[in-house]
Image (spheres, rainbow, N blue to C red):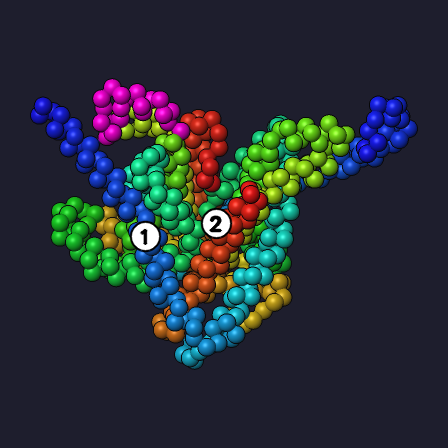
Amino acid sequence: MNRLIVRIAVDRLVTGLIAISVALAAIPVIILLLFVVIKGVPGILASGFFTQSFHPYGVPGGGVLNAIVGTLEIVGIGSLLAVPVGALIGIFLSEYGRNQIGDTVRFISDVLTGLPSIAFGIFGYTVLVATLGHFSAVSASVALAVLMLPVILRATETALLLVPHSLREAGLALGAPRWRVTMEVIVPAALGGIVTGALLAMARAAGETAPLLFTALGNDYLQTNPLRPMGALALTVFRNALLPYSNLQDQAWAAGLLLVMLVALTNILARIYVRRIQR
Amino acid sequence: MSRATAEVIPAPPVAKSHRRRFNAGDQVFTGLAYAAALLMIVIAVIFVIALVIPALPAITSFGVGFLTGRVWDPVHLRFGALPAIYGTLVTSAIGILLAFPIGLGAALFLAEEGGLSAIRGPLSFAIELLAAIPSVVIGLWAFFILTPIMRSIVDPFLNHTLGFLPFFRGGASGYGYLTAGVVLAIMVLPIMTALSRDVIRAVPRALREASLALGATNAESIWSVVLPFARVGITGAVLLSLGRALGETIAVTMVIGNSPNISASLFSLGYTLPSVIANEFTEAVGKVYQGALFELALILALITIVVNVLARLLIWRFKGSEPSVA
């Protein structure tokens, strides 16, 4: 009888501990978002935040136009490089990849996924910055593209493998060649997964800071030439946070909020898209 | 295709020319797919070269002593990696120690079926959302919000209660190993939770139900059925989280204090492999200084690759498939 009470007490205790850990796991994200919103909104509402570039230290005002343009351009070029190549590699893995080459590519992709993002910065630096002799936005795009590849190709492979085999067989039975079956039957059927993968990869790339430190470097002026150093929202957050000027720190919070909204928007878009495709 | 009747079966010339054209299409497409796959292998080779070649000057000039050197003094060109390696290991260990019990507990809750299912979805979503927040934003939050809390509440409390241990001695600035460890715990929590949840979900229901049917309480069946079954997979989840913690750069750089120390006290300022590189790279002048940073990057890459490959082997052995969260 006594033992039973102990057993029940232990069970209750474990249930309680599990409840506490769930709360502890969910609290950080709530606190984080709360602070980013509260601290970031004033900076976003400040005049000139979206329309002006960085103002020198001590000069009030200024905005992050240079960083917004930079993030969009760097991630945009990176996506243009990574999405087609990543999708094609994903198609290779699911359609032709049951061999040594496929296994090698999968292994490389897994290793790249596990590499710290700073390693991609070093990659971009040695391959492009050191050889061209100067920092540039395009080197950041290449570094981010390589960082995005594993996400996109894995998402593509998974999505393609989920397409029912009967669809493929039906296409082939109608006499269509393999490539047309792949491009006109299987890829459209798996498009939801592929687009989701691409969007998630873009969201991740937009939030990365470490690779940009060695490639895009940052730029306080509006710059659209991809061969020149360029600012980015993540770089603004990182640099401004450590500066002893309150208006610049406000900008850091606001840029952080903007970054979170960008990432959240991309994630939500991906979810909505999946839902629409599944219907 | 449209005239698909029995009489049309013998139509060799048309079919032949069609097949030839389609075969050409197939060959082009296959060639493209193989080219893309080969590009991936080329990227990997370039990646290895890009990490190894620039590190060579440092490797040849410092030798093995680089790994054990305790002095990091760029002004006098004396470079030892030990403070950074130590800081990386200590902060990651703190991060995993904090995140493991919380992540496992949360995973046990999220993997369960039945009751309270209404809050499971939102909770899962909230925890996964944390993984999507850029690390620089977490660093920003930690720099302005977490460090004052650590300085005025957590560190003095630990010093007061556990001050007899060498880990909790000395003055606290709010920056340093412990704060960086807490940040890492927050950052790896989503992966730890999501992976453990998937592993626990893969435990056969029949096993759990058998244990409950035999009269075991929920806690007892977790302890003696679920956890032993999921042990290998959970170990894999911990290792993957460790891989993430070891390489985390920006958030750690913002709170660790960036000072090459080796100190038992978790309150003291430190350095980690990625934070040295991020912090000093743009000011590194000269082949030797830059080479030393490149060698740190190489060491970091090697450590994380080993940890990740181990993790994937374990999870793969457990599930017979790939981990769902990368």
Residue sitting nearer the eye, B56 or B115: B115
Relative to A114, B233 lies left or right: left
Residue sitting nearer the eye, B262 or B60: B262
**Position in image of residue A89 (x %, y %):** 63, 39
Q: Which residue is mark 1?
A: A28
Relative to A272, B127 lies left or right: left
Vertically, is B47 above or below B210?
A: below
- Could you tell me which chain the residue with mark 2 belongs to? A
Magenta span covers which residues?
A: B202-221
Mark 2 is surrounded, within 10 Å at the Cα level, by few (under 14), some (14 to 19) or many (20 or more) other residues, namely: many
Mark 1 is surrounded, within 10 Å at the Cα level, by few (under 14), some (14 to 19) or many (20 or more) other residues, namely: some
Seen at 63% across and 53% down, the residue is A80
Three-letter code, disc 1: Pro
**Position in image of residue B107 (x %, y %):** 33, 38
Res A228 quadrant in image: bottom right
Can residue A239 be seen in the rendering of this structure?
Answer: no
Seen at 38% across and 63% down, the residue is A37
Magenta stretch: residue A259 in it?
no
Q: Which residue is mark 2?
A: A117
**Position in image of residue A167 (x %, y %):** 65, 31
